[in-house]
Image (cartoon, helix red, strand yellow):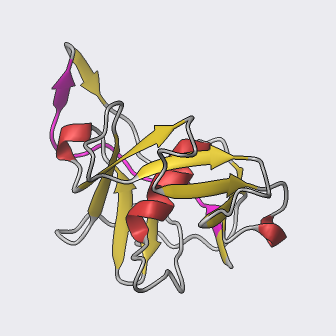
C-alpha cells in the first residue's frame, strides 16, 4: 500500500505566467514524487504529458478507482498532516510528468470511473483526507504515476522550495 502525507502546499508558482480565458493560472499544483521523478497536476491541460478524463458510466471507464473510508484499505492514501517534510520531493525537473484532467478526453486517454462501491472490480483503491488534493486529483496523479506493467512500489509527497 502507498501512503502519502501532504507536507506543504505542494508546489509554488511556475516561473512563467499562463493565461487561459483571460485569467492568470496561479498557485500550487498537487504533486507526488515517485522514485526519482515527480508527477504533478498540470497548471493547464494543454501542458500535460498525459491527460485523463472522468466518467460517470462504468462501462466506458478504462480504469476503475474505488474510494475507501480507511487508509488501511487503500492502495494510495493522501492525508494532510505535518510529518517528515521532503522539501525536494516534488522538484520540477525535465523528468516531471504533468497530468491534465480533460473535460473531453481523447479516445486513447485513460478514462477514470470513481466509485464508493466495493463490488466494482476496482483497479485501485484510494483514501483522501486532504485540503490540498481532491479525489479526482489524487486519482489522476495515481494513474499518471502508474505503469500497468510496473506498478508503483514507493512514492512520497513533498514541497518544492
Q: Magenta residues, as a range?
A: 4-20
Identify which residue, 22 or 58, lies in the foreground: 58
Residue 10 magenta-drawn? yes
Residue 70 image point, x, y percent:
84, 61
* Residue in the image at 22% along x and 68% along y: 93
Q: Quadrant of residue 22?
A: top left
Residue 61 image point, x, y percent:
49, 49
Q: Which is the main secondary structure of the residues drawn in magenta?
A: loop
Q: Does residue 77 sit above or below 105 in this rendering?
A: below
Q: Is residue 16 left or right of residue 26?
A: left
Q: Is residue 56 left or right of residue 33?
A: right
Q: Is residue 132 visible?
A: no
Residue 120 image point, x, y percent:
71, 56
Q: Is residue 158 left or right of residue 123?
A: left
Q: Does residue 49 sit above or below 153 in this rendering?
A: above
Q: Is residue 35 visible?
A: yes
Amino acid at each position: 500500500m502507498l501512503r502519502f502525507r501532504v507536507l506543504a502546499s505542494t508546489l509554488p508558482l511556475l516561473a512563467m505566467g499562463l493565461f487561459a480565458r483571460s485569467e492568470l493560472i496561479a498557485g500550487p499544483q498537487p504533486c507526488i514524487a515517485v522514485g526519482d521523478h515527480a508527477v504533478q497536476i498540470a497548471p493547464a491541460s494543454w501542458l500535460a504529458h498525459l491527460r485523463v478524463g472522468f466518467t460517470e458510466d462504468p462501462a466506458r471507464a478504462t480504469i476503475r478507482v474505488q474510494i475507501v473510508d480507511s487508509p488501511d484499505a487503500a492502495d494510495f492514501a493522501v492525508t494532510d498532516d505535518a510529518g517528515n517534510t521532503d522539501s525536494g520531493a516534488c522538484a520540477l525537473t525535465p523528468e516531471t510528468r504533468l497530468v491534465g484532467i480533460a473535460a473531453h478526453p481523447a479516445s486513447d486517454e485513460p478514462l477514470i470511473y470513481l466509485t464508493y462501491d466495493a463490488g466494482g472490480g476496482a483497479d485501485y483503491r484510494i483514501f483522501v483526507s486532504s485540503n490540498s488534493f481532491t479525489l479526482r486529483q489524487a486519482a489522476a496523479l495515481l494513474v499518471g504515476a502508474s505503469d500497468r506493467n510496473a506498478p508503483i512500489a514507493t512514492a512520497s509527497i513533498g514541497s518544492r522550495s
